[in-house]
Image: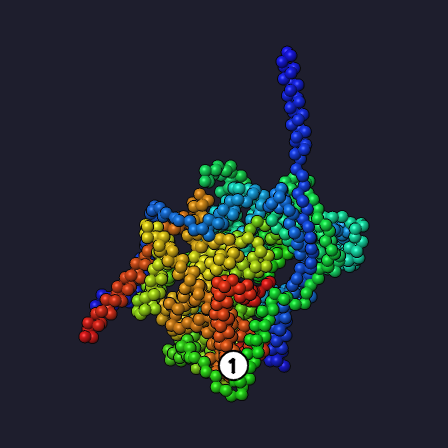
Amino acid sequence: MRRQLPFILVFAFGLFMIFQYFVPHESSERAYEFLLDWTTIIGIFALAVGIWSLVSVTIEKIKLRKPAWQYSFFTLAGLFLMILFGFTAKVDGHWGFHFYTSEGLQNPMFRSFFDYILTPIQATMFSMLAFFIASAAYRAFRARNVLATLLLIAALIMMMRFNPFLGPVGPLFEKTANWLLNVPSLAANRAIIIGIGLGMVATALKVILGIERGYMGK
Amino acid sequence: MITYDKLMSLDRRWVFLFLALVCVGAYISSVEVPLRVNKEVNKIYNFIDTLKPGQIVFIAIDYDPSSQAELHPMTYALSEQCFRKGIKVIYTALSQNGPGMADQAIRDIGDSMKVDRTYNGVTYKGRAIKSGVDYVFLGYKAYFAIQILSMGQDFRLPFPQDYYGKPLDSLPMMNGVRNYSQIACVVDIGAGNITDAWISYGQGRFGFPMALGTTGVMAPIYYPYLNSGQLMGIMGGLLGAAQYEQLCDNPGLAKDGMRVQLFGHMVIILFIIVGNIGFFMSRAAKKREGR
Amino acid sequence: MKRILLTTTFLLLLMGVASAQADSAAPSPPAPPTGVKAVDKPNDHGHAVNISWDMSPDDGKGANSVVTYDVFRWIPAYMDSVAQIRAGLSGIRDTINILDRANRKWSVLEEHLTGDSAKLANDSVVAAQRIPQLRADLKRFRQVLASAVERLPEAHKTYPENGSWRRVGTVPAGQGKYSNVGSKEYEEPDYLPDFSDFYYRVDAVGVVSTTRSSSEVSAPVHSSGQWFNTGRTTVLVFVLAFGFLTVLFVRKARAGHDLYVRPLAGIDAVDDAIGRATEMGRPILYLLGAGTAADIATIASFTILARVSKKVAEYQTTLIVPCYDPIVMSIAQDIVKTGYSDAGRPDAYKEDMVFFITQSQFAYVAAVNGIMIRDLPATNLYMGKFYAESLIFAETGALAGSIQIAGTDEVAQLPFFVVACDYTLIGEELFAASAYLGREPLLLGTLKAQDYAKAAVLLLAIVGLLAVNVGHEANVEWLMKFKELFKVID
């Protein structure tokens, strides 16, 4: 029964989701909204489980002195300090814990940590993409065969399309690049998207009908 | 031959170093990058420009600090254009770190608005913008798709209070403003799946005019929506942001960053060419040896 | 003097004529719109009516004097009584919110405060004592409103007595339709009751808002919800056909028919990659992507993880699964645990194999890259939804010398994976992977159904292309409308 119950639930709710797509009636809409509320509630509980997992894995790392365990202190400090700052605020000249109101969002430490630590760190991570694009392009765009040559030429045209130093040839590049985007690239995209769409419907059916039980570890 | 092989298997850290040097060099240089403005950016500018004072533009700030380099300049240029023209703005931030981005942008734009400025030949007097009067920042709530749908019913359903904790009904600007029907357009500035939700759940369901600001990587994905008429315009990446700044006559971070991007692209092209020369030379050398 | 007098008289006369002319030039109202029809909005949950009309003869032609059309609905006075109860209700709700908020804010600080602030804090704490009473009032108001709303259809029957015409919408000239959409929640001010007689009237309005003329009143209409969305019939037909094909091929597969599927290099590489990790004595990193548990790509990834974890347990290799979403993490933990017990090694499973990191995109990237650089996994598997982080993962993995296999349905990220990984499963190949890995006839059956559906889509696309083009050339209406068959209305 412990194994059967999840499949029954998946079958019932999966079927209901299909049903409500075709039934616009108020009662079906209300049931749908009720289920959406449940998604939010489950998500919040799962977040607590997730945070617990993060904390226990990090503490374990420190205990066992795993490689680079020292960084784990930063993880824990980041997690707990931001929560602490987010709940404390100075109102009318006095500091206090504000669990239920949004006063903590104005906490200067909360803002400073966001503006001067989180923002630059995240921006740095994203900017690494530029370097990786350069190195990936260097390795990948080589005219090994006909297809690779086509890819190489298309890539060069795309990169040159907004180059202002090309003079009168510039607009030609832009036109060709737009054609590449709107015709061959779009056609290929659509073909992939149709395949994905069918694959999604098939997977959904497999899950609802209980043919695919991998998500249960079966 | 050894040299070509070396060229082929060049340690990528050299690529990184060279790119970094060129980027820094480009940043400190003062080369002016001329821009051609795309029609999809122009359309957004013209739409906002023809709105009347008092009308409301909805700006969804759905990005994290990671994509701020490309997207923050769009928020700045667009918001300042609205405020200078007396257009009101509703902000939301449905990505996890979005509220911080929005809060930062609102503070900075507030400072900039206090100064007299001339844009496109029109001088605007400096003034302080007020929350609840000139703009409302609704804040963040998890599960964006559900929030986008509920805002179609009433902004008060997901956000009974604004980000600063004031009930929406107590804000003068929200008087009579219930849902998207009272909004001139929605501009989503985002870098991921929240944008998809805005298009399918928001625009698809409620039919408001919608424009998009997105990162350079994601922009090509959304062009089909431009053709289908679901989007009126797209600002794509740093280039889109720089074009918008140029249209607003308000050059900022994007215009500045274009220099770096342009030279960065040229370095990548250079490396591709060098890589191919190495590839052909070493192949030719191998063929010669084989013979 | 005489001259001045004459001039004045003349001027006065002139002004008189001018004002008389101005009077006669007072704009006359445009001709009214005709044929106002109101019907229940189809394919919806109710609480909405579509109104259409034949435009005024003065709209765009004739006197060309129509600026807007105002749409009016007859509303019984009883609606105002209901609105008053509703306003009372929302007033109480707001008061509770404000008192509650003030109380929460000040009760924290109460003991530290002195002077005016202390008085303010004390006042708000005292005022908050009213909240239970207000909550009881709120409940009572809700009951009253609920029973008042039930009588709305009855009140609408009293037309045309005890009510008035109110504007419900305005559309610009040149447009002959409007949707009067209300809320389904009776606590909302724009609530529109179902099964009530609605009467509509449309005014053509000129430049001055008082110059208007009204149409005839429409026949009464009821709004109500429907039990089937006819705009989605095509989808239903497709789902049924596809479901039929799936069942058919699953039965065939069960009956022992040999179903051929083309080999996929990326799938074959998975087993080799696990073997390689075992030989090298290094771990396997498995990423489920940035999707939620509701994304089909993540579900497909779960099924691959199930097979991978079983194999990993058999080969006694280490598995690392850092997660982006807590729900995904909980499911993944169960999958890996089951995989280990199915392989007969439940003791080898450790809780910290599958763990949550963060839902912040690039903080997640930083953590995973750290794992790649420190633990140097032999194999990286990226299966699921990936966004801007794809190339950062794949390039760092390449730098660490790992074999990499990726699979995603995010079209924008596919090029990045293709250039930086050893094998990439493109879109649907990811969904098919579980069938390939397991080689179970049931799963292969669904793959076959997918192939046939794809063939049908291809055929329909070609037929549609021909039909629309031939129809356009030969001007055959029904051929041109072929594509309308596939239109899905939301």
Q: Is residue C116 above or below residue C232?
A: above
Q: Residue at x 43, y 46 (%)?
A: B246
What residue does disc 1 label?
A: C445
Where is residue A30, by image quadrant?
bottom right
Q: Amino acid at mark 1?
A: Gly
Q: How many marks?
A: 1
User: In the image, is B202 to the left or to the right of A137?
Assistant: right
Where is residue C31, by image quadrant?
top right
- The residue carrying pointer 1 sits among few (fewer than 14), some (14 to 19) or many (20 or more) residues within 10 Å by Cα, namely many
Describe the element under mark 1 as helix, strand or loop. helix
- Whether residue C431 is visible to the viewer of this picture, yes or no, is no
Please name whichever residue, A28 or C27, is drawn nearer the observer in this view of the structure. C27
Q: Residue at x 50, y 67 (%)?
A: C467
Q: Residue at x 59, y 50 (%)?
A: B183
Q: Residue at x 53, y 57 (%)?
A: B230
| Quadrant of the rendering where the C terminus of chain C is positioned | bottom right
Q: Where in the figure is residue C474, as x and y percent of width and height?
A: 50, 63
Where is residue B265, by image quadrant?
bottom left
Task: Output the chain of dot 1.
Answer: C
Please name whichever residue, B246 or C126, is drawn nearer the observer in this view of the structure. B246
| Quadrant of the rendering where the N terminus of chain C is positioned | top right
- Whether residue B85 is visible to the viewer of this picture, yes or no, is yes
Please name whichever residue, B147 or A65, is drawn nearer the observer in this view of the structure. B147
Residue with the most extreme top position: C1
Residue with the most extreme bottom position: C256
Q: Where in the figure is residue A139, as x and y percent of width and height?
A: 33, 66
Please name whichever residue, A83 or B284, is drawn nearer the observer in this view of the structure. B284
Q: Where in the figure is residue B212, as x and y percent of width and height?
A: 50, 54
Q: Where in the figure is residue C135, as x and y percent of width and height?
A: 74, 56
Residue with the most extreme front position: C474
